Image: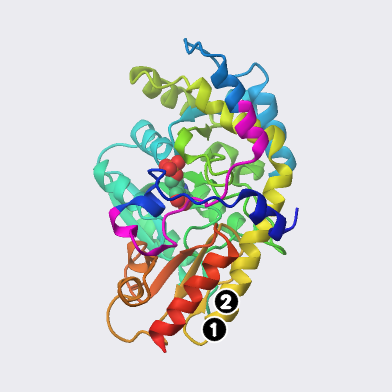
Amino acid sequence: MNSKSFQEKYYVDRHDTNCYKWDSDKAKNKLPMWIADTDFKTPQKIIDSLKLKLEEGSYGYGFLPRDYYDVMISWNKKISNVEYKKEWIRFSKGAIDGICQIINSLTHEKDSILICEPVYNPFREIIKVSKRKLVVSNLINNNYHFEMDFKDIENKIVKNNVKMLILCSPHNPVSRVWNEAELEKLFAITHKYSVIVVSDEVHSELIMPGFHFIPSLSFKKYQNDIITINAESKTFSLALFNHCHIVIPNKKFRKEIDEYQNAHHIASPNAFNGLSSYYAYKYGEDWLDGFKKTVYENYLYLKKSLKDYCDINDLEGTYLAFADFSKSIKEGNAANKLYESADVYLNAGDTYGKGYEKWVRFNLATSLDNVKKACRRIKKALS
Ligand SMILES: Cc1ncc(COP(=O)(O)O)c(C=O)c1O
């Protein structure tokens, strides 16, 4: 499906639907391009299938379709060329809930956990609230292509006796799709020091032309070190359903996470919520193609239109573009400035790491018309 047909068919006015993006107090009378969800309806077949389920009218205890795991495993093999096994798969209410469970099951208070900033800010917050020690390695900005600083990562692992590393792959907000050599280098280091890797891959299906996503669990020799977080919430606009997978090849880790889940009575997925992902696997491929084309077209427009005002990272993956307004905004925080003067609501760069107050994160999962409107408003405000 091309991006024009995709937008005509699926763009939805989300005003007055109790969604944070458009309806929160801060978003009123602004053009919202913050928070990571989409302004598109999920594929029609998913909506129709869920309606049929709702129409059954009897909502007693239930379980996932018997072929759920086969369908999930085949989708991941087809889209990302990774082979999950049924016995590796567990569930959580979301990616952050899953990572919290892993932290609580496999590490102890005061243990060190490393993240690479700038990064999705809840990583930092959950490490702190779990009373673990936060260790940060800064990504290197190599002319708007962010890279991991392997030397620094290794030094910090050794110095802080790091037990766990949370990897964002693809990376929010810097839009990188880590390549095979980078991941091999990282996993060689984490393996050497017995560091558990939690690979958050919730954006893994949103890969832009010319890039290729490498799932962390496709590195067979490091499988026992890695736990993957996998969900359809970002891709298919299903965050409301709170359905996420924790994929755990390591038997010992699995046992500890099972014990944690059983102790907290959270092992069983919500069978209705899980249906949303099940139908996405069955019916989502054509929609996904149209969605990716739309995001990429939006990105190309944004980059060209704002070239005199900001520098934007290459969008390798995700629908989130990270932009540096240092050349046009000299004073204060760029997101605040654009909120006040352009009425465009963006995520502030310094949410994701220190030193990024001139950066903003654009959510491109919207119509090209909205992107054009945002660009017009920003150019007018900064001219
Ligand atoms: C990398 C990443 N992980 C996790 C999340 C949050 O996922 P969840 O709502 O399932 O906790 C987001 C949301 O934007 C994200 O970008």
Mark 2 touches mark 1? (CB < 8 Å): yes
Q: Is residue 253 highlighted in magenta?
A: no
The answer to which of 76 and 44 lies nearer the viewer is: 44
Query: Which segment did they paint magenta?
Result: 25-49
Q: From what the image shows, is residue 77 above or below residue 71?
A: below
Label 1 sits on what residue type?
Lys
Answer few, some or many: residues within 10 Å of disc 1's Cα (few below 14, many 20 plus, some between 14 and 19): few
In the foreground, 314 or 285: 285
Q: CA distance from mark 2 to mark 1?
A: 6 Å
Q: Can residue 342 be seen here? A: yes
| Up/down of 317 relative to 87, above or below | below
- Pick the front one: 330 or 221: 330
Amino acid type of disc 2?
Answer: Lys
When the figure is inspected, residue 49 is found, relative to residue 337, above or below; the finding is: above
**Residue 205 coordinates in the image, percent (x, y):** 63, 49
Quadrant holding the C terminus: bottom left
Report how many numbered discs are placed on residues in the image. Answer: 2
- Pick whichever, 113 or 379, lies toward us: 379
Using the rendered image of the protein, determine whether residue 83 is visible from the camera's viewpoint. Answer: no
The spot of residue 287 in percent (x, y) is: 69, 46
The x, y position of residue 111, in whole percent, is 30, 44
Residue at the disc numbered 1: 307
- Which picture quadrant has residue 181? bottom right
